[in-house]
Amino acid sequence: MLSWVKFRLEHLKKWREYAQSVAKASKALDPEAKVYVFGGVAENRMTSISDIDILIVWSFE
């Protein structure tokens, strides 16, 4: 396997860790924030060209 492919896949495997960091930062700004991960990574269909799709919904009025 090419080194860059291995590098990307190793990072993509940490998607939960990254999503938790985003959620923590979002909730520091808005305790009611909702954070969703969707797409191929969340559905365990990652490839070397995948990304991590994260949606943040804030309750700011």
Image (tube, rainbow, N blue to C red):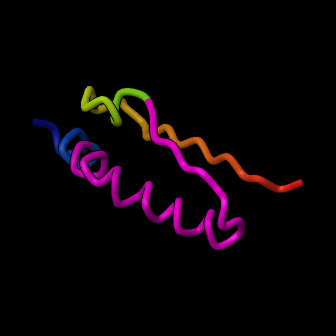
**Main secondary structure of the magenta stretch:** helix
Q: Residue at x 77, y 53 (%)?
A: 59
Vertically, is 18 above or below 48? below
Q: Is residue 21 left or right of residue 55?
A: left
> Residue 6 appears at what percent x and percent y?
18, 44
Q: Residue at x 30, y 46 (%)?
A: 12
Query: Quick one: quadrant of the C terminus?
Result: bottom right
Of residue 44 and residue 5, the one placed in the foreground of this image is: 44
Residue 18 seen from this side: yes
Q: Residue furthest right?
A: 61
Of residue 50 and residue 44, the one placed in the foreground of this image is: 44
Q: Is residue 54 left or right of residue 17?
A: right
Q: Residue furthest bottom?
A: 28
Residue 47 seen from this side: no
Of residue 7 and residue 36, the one placed in the foreground of this image is: 36
Q: Is residue 32 left or right of residue 48?
A: right
**Tally of numbered discs:** 0
Magenta region = 9-38
Residue 13 part of the magenta-drawn span: yes
Q: Residue at x 35, y 60 (%)?
A: 17
> Residue 47 appears at what percent x and percent y?
27, 29
Query: Quick one: quadrant of the N terminus?
Result: top left
Q: Residue at x 53, y 60 (%)?
A: 23
Vertically, is 58 above or below 36? below
Image quarter of residue 46: top left
Q: Is residue 16 left or right of residue 56?
A: left
> Residue 4 appears at what percent x and percent y?
25, 43
Q: Residue furthest left?
A: 1
Image quarter of residue 50: top left
Residue 51 part of the magenta-drawn span: no
Of residue 60 and residue 45, the one placed in the foreground of this image is: 60
> Residue 37 appears at what percent x and percent y?
46, 41
